[in-house]
Structure formats: C-alpha cells, structure tokens
Image (cartoon, helix red, strand yellow):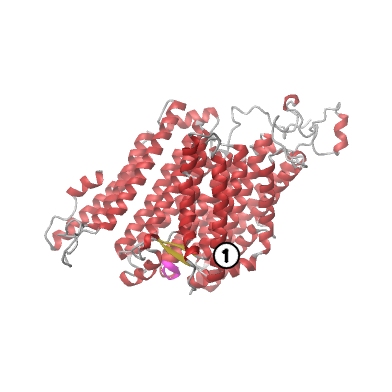
Amino acid sequence: MSEPLPLIELLLPLAVVVPIVAATLPLALGLRYDDVGWSVAAVTSVGLVGIAGAVAAEVYTAGRFAHELGGYQPPVGIELVADELSAAVLVLIAVVAAATLAFSRVAGPRGNAFYSGYLLLTGGLSGVVLTGDLFNLFVFLEIVGLTTYALIAADRSGASAYASLKYLMLGTVGASLYLVGVGYVFLATGSLNMLDLQTQIVEQASYTDPLIQAGFAFIVAGFALKIALFPVHTWQPDAYQRAPDSVTVFVAALVSTAGAYALIRVTYTVFTVDFLLANDAITTVLLVVTGVSILAGSVLAAMQSDLKRMFAYSSVAQFGMIAAAVALANEWALLGGIVHLLGHGLLKFGLFLAAGLLALGYGARRVEDLASLARRAPYTAGSLAVLGLALVGIPPSIGFLGKWYIAFGAVQESGAGGGAVGIGIAAVIFISTLFTLAYVARLIEQLYFAGVGLDDGHGEGVADTDEHGGNVVADGGQAADHDADDPISPKSGAPTTLGVPDRVPTGAFVVLLLATATAVALGFAGATFADLFDPFLSEVFA
Amino acid sequence: MTASSVLSAAPVIGASGVLDVLATRHAYVVFALLLCIGLYMMIANPNLIKKLIGLNLFQTAIFLLFVVSAYVEGGAIPIIPAGTEQGAAYASPLPHVIVLTAIVVGVSLTAVGLALCIRIYDEYGTLRADTLRDLMREEGSLPAEVGQEPDAAGVARSDGGETNE
C-alpha cells in the first residue's frame, strides 16, 4: 500500500461531513430565501460525486486507504476506510443521489425540510459505507434509518405516516438486534474496530465461541430486517408504495443497498470466511432463509397490480440473492453479490424513476394503467421495458452478470462439497428468474399490446384512428374529453420533453435514459468488475 | 434513564466465587427479560403508543447489557487525574459512551415515532393498529389481502385496458 497524500485521505471525512453540514443550510437559508433547498442539495451532491470519483480513482489505482478521525490511532480511535468494495458503493450512492435531484425538482416533495432530510440521508449512507468501526456503523445506520422514516412520511397522507411508523418499529428492532450482536462481540473481544476484530476474534475467542456465534446471529438478524428478507420484509412494500415518488426512487435504490453492503462488510471483514466455514449450521440456516426469500419475493411481486408495490416485492427477492451470495462463502458468489448489489441499486433507481415519470405525466400507477402507454410515451415505456428485462437477467445487462455469478458460485460450491444447498440456491434463482419474467412480461404486454379496441389502441395501425369519428387523442390530448374507453392520456399541464412525444420532464427523462444505457452497458463489464474487486476478493478469500 | 436505575439494583454485589457469578448472570437475565417484554409489547399490543413504549423497553435492555458489561468489581469512576498511579481499577468508560450515543439515537427515534403517531391520530382518529387497518382498508390505501389490492376507492379513472368492444 503506497502512502496516500493527506489531501486524498481527507476526502473520506469530507464525504460524510459535507452532506451532513450542508443539511443545515436549506433550513437556515430557508428563513430568508424560498426554495433554496434544491440548489443547496444540487451543489452538495455534485460535490459528493466529485469526492466519490476521486476516492474511487485513488482506491483503484493505489489500493485501500484510511483516515483516523481526530488523530486517534485505531483500534481505539474510529477510522474511515475506503477499499475496493466501499469505493464502488460510494460512487453508486453519490451518482444516484445526484440523479434523484433531477426528478425531485419536478415531482416534489417541495420545501426546504425535504432537502435537509435528503442531505442527512446522503451523508448517513456515505458514513455506513466508509466507516471501519462496528459501533460507528450502528450510528450511521440509525442516521440513515431516522431520515428515511421522515422522508417516507413526507407525503403528508395518513397512509404514508402509518407505513413510516411500521418501518420505524421494524427498522429500529433491526438496528437494535445489530447492536446486541455488536455488544456480544465486544464482550468477547473488547474491540470495535473491524480490522482489529478480525484478529481479536481468533486470539481472544474462537470461531466456535458461543458468544461470537450468537453475536453473528444477532447481527445477521438485524440486517435481515434492514434489507427486508422474506419473513421480516413486511415494512418494505408499504413504505415504498406510500412514500412520495422521488423518495421511493432514492430509498429503494440506496437504503437497503447500504444495509446489504454492511452485511457483506461485517461478514467478510469482521467474521471472515473461516467463521462461515467453521459454522455450517449458521450458513445453512441463512441459505434456507434467503432461498425462501428469493422465492417468496418473486411470487408476491408477480401477484401485485400496483407498480411500486411490484418492484418493492421484487427487491425482497433480489436482496435474498445478495444475502445468499454472502452465505455461500464462495469467491464467485461474493463477486456476484457485489455486482448484483450495485446493479440492483441502479435497476431499481431506473424502474422506480420510470414508474414515477409515468405517474407524473400520465397518472399511471397500476399495471392496467399502462395499457398502450408505449404509444404515448415511447421512450419512457421503452426504458421501463429494457430495465425490466435487465432485472429478469437478459444479457447483456448488469442484472444478468450479478445473477450469473451468484448462480455459478452456488453450483461451484455444491460441487466442492457444499451439498444440496448450493444447487438449491441455483435452482431457486432460476425459478425466481421465471417469476421475474412473468411480471416483467405483464408490464411489457400492457405497454405494447394491451388496449386493443381503444380509440388510439393497438391493432389496425395508426390510420385506423381516423375512422372513429376523428376522435384522435394525439399526444397532449386533453384529459377532459376522454371517457371510460379512452386509453390513458397525458395529464393536462404535464411537463414536456423537447423533441420526443413523452409528456415527462426533460431533466429526469435524460437521467432515465442514461440509467437505462448504463444498466445495459455495464452488462459488458463482467471482466472489469472481476478485476476491480479482485484485490478485495483475494484478501477475503486469502 | 431507566438503565441506570435498573443498574443500581442489578449488578454484582456479591464478594466473590459462586455468588459473584450468580449475581452477574442475574443482570444478564434482566437484560433478556426486558428484551423479551419489549418485543412482546411491540407485537401484541394494538396501541401504537404502547408499541413505542415497548420499543423503548427493548432498547433500554440493550443499554443495560452494555452498562453491566462495563462494571469492574471495586472499580472507581473512570475519571483519572494527572499523576495518578497505574494499576488502580476503573470501570470501563467505552460502553458508557456507547450507551450515551445509543440513548441519543433512541430519543430521536421516539420523537419521530411520536410525531408520526400524532399525524396518524389526526388523520384517522385512532391509535389502535387493528382499527387503523380496517379504516385504511376502507379508504383503499391498504390491500385487503396479501398481494390482492382492491380498486382504490379514490381512483377516478376506470381502467381502459380490459373493456373490449
């Protein structure tokens, strides 16, 4: 490890402190100026993208580096660490946070308080990703949790307040269980620094010490609540559905992602692969739970008729896969887990953004609302379809890469003596893919083929519409003159995009197209991902 | 806080040996009990405020775990003036700091939770979870059964996709 410049090192605390300090500005400046929140948030999040880019450039050229907060040496002091894994997730957080602003500018919620919450959440997420201390991780998890509860309730409806309170209860129990686990590990070793614990667990205790085992179990149970694995996922669909659209975009892409990142970090940096290998029972239980989670999430998603709810249940399945990748303790599976973690964040950002844009421009919130919408919003509908197919795992897309690596790792693991569980996970991923195809195909069918017999419906071609008494509902047709048989029309006064027929705001539209292109382009980056994460993986599986 | 009042009753009073072990375990038994009572309250009690109280109890149990773990028999308060000789016994300050931070987190959580409760009460006029679910089902903002959402009452547009003439 080369000695990094102190300036580079300072980027780590800045990535956490800048958004959190900036979070005070919208409220403070809001006393004098109206609507200053968006500008503050935009400047800060663009700055964060720069910081994250610089951190990533340093990590991928010179290797991991750390910053000791306040000059106290770890293991006593708290350190912030950037390595190959945390840098990648930090970049995802910074980019998604900045991109969300393009949508929240038009979709709301408006007001400076929202942007304060948004910045606090961004800072908390950076903290979760960068911290090298178990208890500090708890604090950042709770900062993330608290601001997420507040943002979800920003809708001002009773239903969103109830969804938020439900999330608050379960999320807090999750964080508290994590804290119990940390307490047990602390009792066994007397340390809280992640790297130090790696050695202390062996020296002060052992991998089969009941206190260490119980600690791990509590920590994993806590994270299971935070990332919404099957039996304890119930907060997630309500929270995602009831939250304002721009909050859903942000929260669905990043909050559970940060939780899953923390699960990978704690499992592999603190407890290490040897712990998993020494505790077959724990990994088997974990694999069974994640397998059930993958199946149940996919089935429940296929049963939904509300778009946001469907994608929320789909997250349960995808995070099941990521957690399964963690429990498999296989190098390929873990690579797949990391790629799927990043890919899922990007895909869910795009999917919720597309759903939000269709709701904003056309009022389409349910699957049947989408009928023939591809005709009125060809680009937005096309993005939704492409992102959906990427979620299914059609190559080339990042969704395919992640699932493929996880399934490959699972098969390899069972070949290496892991037994039936590995094959089971691979089979479950395959079945889940079929279910994902089922609900994505339903969306595509609605978008492109439903609505036969409607005035502007699909069927005999565009010229056909003239035969219906000239009742042509052109793009931008008034909502006033559509009766029950009309296909869904753009809302009157919906913002427009230059040069395309979609009635969606330009900035968010461009972001959506970029996200779609990135999701496809990253499908070609399998070897790059393997190279990027190789230092982390080879250290973990040393 | 509750943690400190429980602490004064619970931890190690016994001098040594078996009594010491028993007394130490006693504190951990209280921890487990509080944890379970809190969790049970959150699950079983229909009142949202009482659920929040259960949540607080649950967190307080964890504070107790940390505080108990910091106890050193015969240890003094860890305030060490300059020039003090080495080797004297002090209680470990680190878990106390952790608990302090956790209390702050817990207070903010309670505040957010109570604020949400106020809004729910304003909107629906009840804080009972079961009544609330019925009310929300009536207004259509909660699915009737898992996965099967009825048509929301407030949806103005009748669906265009199904009607085929």
At 25% from the left and 43% from the top, the residue drawn is B1
Q: Nearer the viewer, residue B60 or B28?
A: B60
Q: Nearer the viewer, residue A167 or A492?
A: A492
Decide: is A318 above or below A421.
above
Q: Amino acid at mark 1?
A: Ala
At 41% from the left and 33% from the top, the residue drawn is B117
Residue A272 falls within the magenta-colored stretch: yes
Q: Which residues are magenta?
A: A271-276
What chain does badge 1 belong to?
A: A
> Dot 1 surroundings within 10 Å: few (below 14), some, or many (20 or more)?
few
Left or right position of B21 against B147: left
The reply to whether residue B56 is visible in this rendering is yes
Residue annotated with mark 1: A57
Dominant secondary structure (helix, strand or loop) of the stretch shown in magenta? helix
Residue extending farthest left: B15
Residue A229 falls within the magenta-colored stretch: no
Q: Secondary structure at mark 1?
A: helix
Decide: is B36 above or below A409.
above
Left or right position of A76 against A238: left
At 43% from the left and 71% from the top, the residue drawn is A274
Q: Nearer the viewer, residue A83 or A187?
A: A83
Decide: is A4 above or below A139.
below
Q: State the image coordinates of residue A191 (x, y, percent, origin top left).
A: 33, 64
Q: State the image coordinates of residue B38 (x, y, percent, origin top left).
A: 32, 43
At 63% from the left and 47% from the top, the residue drawn is A351
Q: State the image coordinates of residue A51 (x, y, percent, origin top left).
A: 54, 57
Determine which quarter of the picture holds residue A305. top right
The reply to whether residue A425 is visible in this rendering is no
Q: State the image coordinates of residue A190 (x, y, percent, origin top left).
A: 30, 64
